[in-house]
Image (cartoon, rainbow, N blue to C red):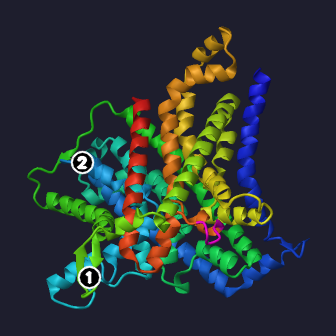
């Protein structure tokens, strides 16, 4: 019986590797296979092309500057949350986490509607200043890329850095101040060294996200001048049909991602050790400053909070508001209208078809990733080795564009499979690391004596799992399903790479609506996607906290 169980779980592990390694092998093999023979000519050709080197350099530069901006804002936000107590602090923390759970195409849409030349911010400034020209011209430029990446990754910096900062005993800084050190000197000599690992951890993870960014660069970059590796891989593969060059760029990108992930893992382990030490060494509750009657200091802190909330909520609120504004046929003014929502839910509309496709693919990928993660949890827990867990997290190393390219090349040999099946399989692999992170801690906390007692009483391993373990795991299982559904529902990169133009999902339709300047329809559809994403991730987090409680 145990032999059968071990074998089935091993097959699940092999199945996971097959879904990941086979398409990646198709992607990378074309970098070395030319005319059915092994050759380095494609690699040499791409490496010697100044255009490709410029793209690589720009990809690294924008990722570095985006990470720097995200970290700068994140350190200030982490300090505010760690050092001060104020009303609605919990709500501010929740709002800070909103951008990261949204699909990237919604970030693009929000920035266009809020920061665009005819966006809400420019419309407001034009009225205040009495001008007919846009005051802020930022879209389709390098600053727009940096701002969108900072918007998207600010929660990562705040989450990682603030967790360590809030665990630190601030009496050390108070002691340094009492010995004559000013705030700046105390921060640089006492606080910063203890935050160094967390800052490096957050910075490397943000760098990885920015380096592999696709939708933000594709739309907000505005053209070839701001092309990055991910966008160029898509263009070479799908538009130029230069598969070998696309594969070489994938190889270069993968090497950089592996290096950054190695830095992140080292820094994360050190940050966790420091955080655990700080928590265990604290004997008294941490002292936090109240902003009541603090004059200039309170003004600066509240100003940062208000501006950061506008920066986050402005683009999102703009999407909901623009969905109800329709241009009048007789003038340039806009009137309140439900026309966009009526168009979405009209019989036979493209939006309804896209919603149906996305929902079907997301449901299938959520179920597959959760079932696969459950089997892998049993395998990893039984094997008791960190190597298996690390291998299971391999999909985090590659971008969805690279994975989508592999499945696209694989589809040429598997034409009998429906495109929706291939997209669901790719989304399964992309969701799997999140499913494992949700389920593995819960699985490891299960009491082994309950399962042993069930087996002793005559239940087989499957019956023992469903009757003993599953009732304890179901909150985490439901959370995994919700996370997988939300991730797949908003996934654009692999879907755009795999699609043939006929299969339309919600993110693909949003991308097309933005390109055709049909912003009201895009915002109406986007508002639905925002609500579903926030509900799925919010309910998932509540279920995770319920398990911990």
Residue 501 within the magenta-colored segment of the rendering = yes
SS of the residue under disc 1: loop
Q: Which residue: 29% across, 62% down?
A: 313
Magenta segment: 498-503
Can I make out residue 83 in this image? no
Number of other residues with Cα within 10 Å of mark 2, as a class: few under 14, some 14 to 19, many 20 or more: some
From the viewer's perspective, is 324 left or right of 144? left
SS of the residue under disc 2: helix
Q: CA distance from mark 2 to mark 1?
A: 42 Å
Q: Pinpoint residue 144: horizontal percent, then vertical percent.
A: 41, 77
Where's the N terminus, which quadrant?
Answer: top right
Q: Which residue: 35% across, 51% down?
A: 191
Number of other residues with Cα within 10 Å of mark 1, as a class: few under 14, some 14 to 19, many 20 or more: few
Mark closer to the chain start, 2 or 1 = 2
Residue designated by label 1 = 328
Residue designated by label 2 = 89
Q: Pinpoint residue 115: horizontal percent, then vertical percent.
A: 33, 76
């Amino acid at each position: 019986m145990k032999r059968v169980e071990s074998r089935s779980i091993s097959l699940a592990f092999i199945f996971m590797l097959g879904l990941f390694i086979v398409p990646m092998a198709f992607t990378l093999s074309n970098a070395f296979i030319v005319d059915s023979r092994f050759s380095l000519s494609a690699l040499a050709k791409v490496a010697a092309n100044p255009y490709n080197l410029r793209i690589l350099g720009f990809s690294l530069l924008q990722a570095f500057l985006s990470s720097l901006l995200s970290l700068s804002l994140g350190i200030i936000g982490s300090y505010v949350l760690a050092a001060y107590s104020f009303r609605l602090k919990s709500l501010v923390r929740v709002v800070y986490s909103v951008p990261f759970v949204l699909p990237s195409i919604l970030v693009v849409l929000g920035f266009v509607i809020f920061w665009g030349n005819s966006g809400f911010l420019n419309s407001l400034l034009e009225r205040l200043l009495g001008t007919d020209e846009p005051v802020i011209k930022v879209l389709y430029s390098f600053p727009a890329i940096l701002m969108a990446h900072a918007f998207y990754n600010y929660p990562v910096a705040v989450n990682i850095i603030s967790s360590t900062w809030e665990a630190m005993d601030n009496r050390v800084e108070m002691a340094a101040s009492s010995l004559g050190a000013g705030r700046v000197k105390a921060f640089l000599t006492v606080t910063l060294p203890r935050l160094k690992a967390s800052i490096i951890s957050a910075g490397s993870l943000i760098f990885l996200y920015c380096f592999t960014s696709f939708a933000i660069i594709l739309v907000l970059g505005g053209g070839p001048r701001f092309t990055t590796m991910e966008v160029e891989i898509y263009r070479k593969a799908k538009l130029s049909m230069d598969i070998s060059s696309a594969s070489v760029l994938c190889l270069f990108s993968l090497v950089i991602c592996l290096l950054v992930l190695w830095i992140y893992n080292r820094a994360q382990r050190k940050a966790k050790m420091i955080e655990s030490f700080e928590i265990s060494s604290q004997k008294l509750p941490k002292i936090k400053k109240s902003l009541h009657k603090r004059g200039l200091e309170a003004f600066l802190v509240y100003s940062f909070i208000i501006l950061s909330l506008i920066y986050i909520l402005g683009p999102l609120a703009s999407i909901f508001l623009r969905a109800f504004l329709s241009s009048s046929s007789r003038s340039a003014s806009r009137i309140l209208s439900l026309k966009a929502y009526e168009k979405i839910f009209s019989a036979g509309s493209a939006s309804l078809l896209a919603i149906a496709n996305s929902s079907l693919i997301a449901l299938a990928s959520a179920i597959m990733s959760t079932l696969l993660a459950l089997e892998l949890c049993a395998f990893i827990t039984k094997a008791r080795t960190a190597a298996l867990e690390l291998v299971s997290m391999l999909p985090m190393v590659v971008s969805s564009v690279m994975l989508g390219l592999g499945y696209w090349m694989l589809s040429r040999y598997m034409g009998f499979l429906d495109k929706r099946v291939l997209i669901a399989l790719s989304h399964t692999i992309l969701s799997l690391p999140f499913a494992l992170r949700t389920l593995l801690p819960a699985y490891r906390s299960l009491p082994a004596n309950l399962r042993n007692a069930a087996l002793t009483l005559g239940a087989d391993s499957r019956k023992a799992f469903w009757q003993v373990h599953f009732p304890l795991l179901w909150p985490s299982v439901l959370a995994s399903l919700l996370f997988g559904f939300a991730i797949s529902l908003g996934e654009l990169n692999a879907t755009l790479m795999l699609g043939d133009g006929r299969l339309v999902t919600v993110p693909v339709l949003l991308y097309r609506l933005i390109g055709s300047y049909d912003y009201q329809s895009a915002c109406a559809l986007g508002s639905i996607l925002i609500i579903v994403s926030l509900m799925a991730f919010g309910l998932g987090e509540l279920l995770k906290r319920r398990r911990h409680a």
